[in-house]
Amino acid sequence: MELSAEERRMLAGAEGEAVRRALSYQQEVGRFFGATRFVQVTNAHMMGDIEVLGDTGLGFLQEMRRLGARARIPITTNARCVDFAWADRLGQDPGECAKERRVIEALQGMDILTTDTCINYQTLYQPHFGERVAWGDTGTCITANSVFGARTNFESGPAALAAAITGRTPEYGFQLDRHRRGSFIVDLSGAALEDLADWGAVGKLVGESHQNYFAVPVFTGLRRVPLADELKHLGCALASYGSMGMFHMIGVTPEAPSLAAAFGGAVPPDVERMTITDSELAAVYRGYDLGAGDARLVVFSGPQLSLFEIKRLSELFAGRRVAPGTSVFVTSSNGVISAAAKLGYLAPLEDAGVAVLEGVCFYILQNLSPMRERNGWRNMISNSAKIVNIIGAHRFRTILRRTADCVEIACTGALR
Amino acid sequence: MTTPLAVIRLDRAFGPVTEGEAVLSEEGFSPRYDLDRWTGLISKPGHKLEGISIKDRICFFPTAKGGIAAGWAFYDIKGKGIAPRAFVFGVTNPVMVQGAVLAGIPIAEGWSEDPRRVLRTGDWVRVDPGRRVVELLRRGAS
């Protein structure tokens, strides 16, 4: 890699051991992908919670802090695994919760904003066209690249942290023009796409059949202007099922004013074309194994809900009660939950018996497997295609349903 | 040095030379979606390798799934002593590489030939990132 004078000084340790380690780590990653230089970034977003860090990761953060690591650009944190107000009720491990506090302390000690949200792009920071950032979770990346026209790779916890410490990232992947061009066309003109779950189901169909970080689907045939939450569920599902980092939507996303533009000039004559209609989406919903049909767990999470999603749920749950024996969880950020409380959207949810958790995401909750066993949860029903995919290692049988159907299942205890 | 029984060339690779028992998967991998990060067993119901341990193995996966978790998770499983000796992917994503580099686990991407045509689970293989090759050293008991 070509290094600037400043980068050479950093690697020589002139800015301290933490900076030296961070840049040399980034250099190794850049080398793998054939990056020829570093590019400056303006914002970072990182995952860091005890469930995924483990003791080794916590030790790493504490050591970096001890070595004087400090963010030189604004950096925020993703959802974490403990909402301290709920930890006892959920039966989370007190020792691990104490470690989670030490994680937060270590992060704050490096001037990291512990915002605990995976929807930073809806609540905290909206990069402008062409802006280079270093973001992880995958949902934040695909939104940055696709919806904002900003530039980022999937930057996992240590990579985003390193980017914040050095203010740069290796230039590879979606930092480069050549990887941002469309790979195949998906025609959605035969799909009504009325619910958020339908958008997630599109992401499942496209992602599962094209698992490749560098595959960039180009969507055409939209019947109406999509809403931000719809693009959120689509992007999160593409990133989850397909490990994809970018999509285009003709007339909607900034690098796709036309089909030709989305392909970087001209559509290749032999380009792959895929069609998704209502009947393929219906087949997705029909395709889930319902097991014995238990409806003991309904989850609205992964990604955290926007204020608009909470408002809708609040209306659907108003005046109803969650069925006996069923648990319902909603997760969002402090900002969204505070606004929802102020606007009166939380009370109907809480009156219905819905648990509203702050700063977490359901699938990363500390102690989730034991929690599942203790509560006898076997099926997990959600309107989020992403969480339906991602929670597998905890041995849930997962089922995607539309938002209003999820509420109906939650309040009747009957899964269809 | 023993003459390898077969050689697969790799497009990109990181880490020191390592040897171990191969585990071949038809399905992609994510430590978040598929792995019990306390035992090292593939735990996702229905995964093609469900119930198999990745500890000390050289794991061949066609694709990477998801997910941002691998960045920390590989370091974590290394600390817990349940990490594989190397990852070899057909197609990977940056998170797997970021995680493997942090943990010091060799990782490679892109193969000249589908390993499932050349290797079987249980075979003893060497991954040499510097020379960008996987070499079959001896057949496992079948």
Image: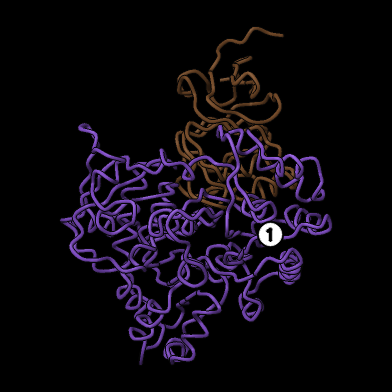
| Residue at x-position 68% and y-position 8% | B2
- Residue at which label 1 appears: A72
Q: Colour of chain A?
A: purple
Q: Residue furthest right?
A: A66
Q: Is residue A397 left or right of residue A198?
A: right
Is B2 located above or below residue B125 in the figure? above
Q: Residue A183: x, y in percent?
A: 32, 40
Count of marks overlaid on the render: 1
| Residue at x-position 42% and y-position 47% | A244
Q: Colour of chain B?
A: brown
| Residue at x-position 59% and y-position 59% | A44
Q: Looking at the figure, which quarter contains the N terminus of chain B?
A: top right
Question: Disc 1 on helix, strand or loop?
Answer: loop
Q: Residue A174: x, y in percent?
A: 46, 45
Badge 1: few (under 14), some or many (20 or more) residues near its Cα, within 10 Å?
some
Q: Residue A340: x, y in percent?
A: 46, 85
Is A347 located above or below residue A395 in the figure? below
Out of A19 and B43, give the one closest to the viewer: A19
Which residue type carries mark 1?
Arg
Q: Looking at the figure, which quarter contains the C terminus of chain B?
A: top right
Which chain does tag 1 point to?
A
Q: Is residue B92 left or right of residue A322?
A: right
Out of B53 and A311, give the one closest to the viewer: A311
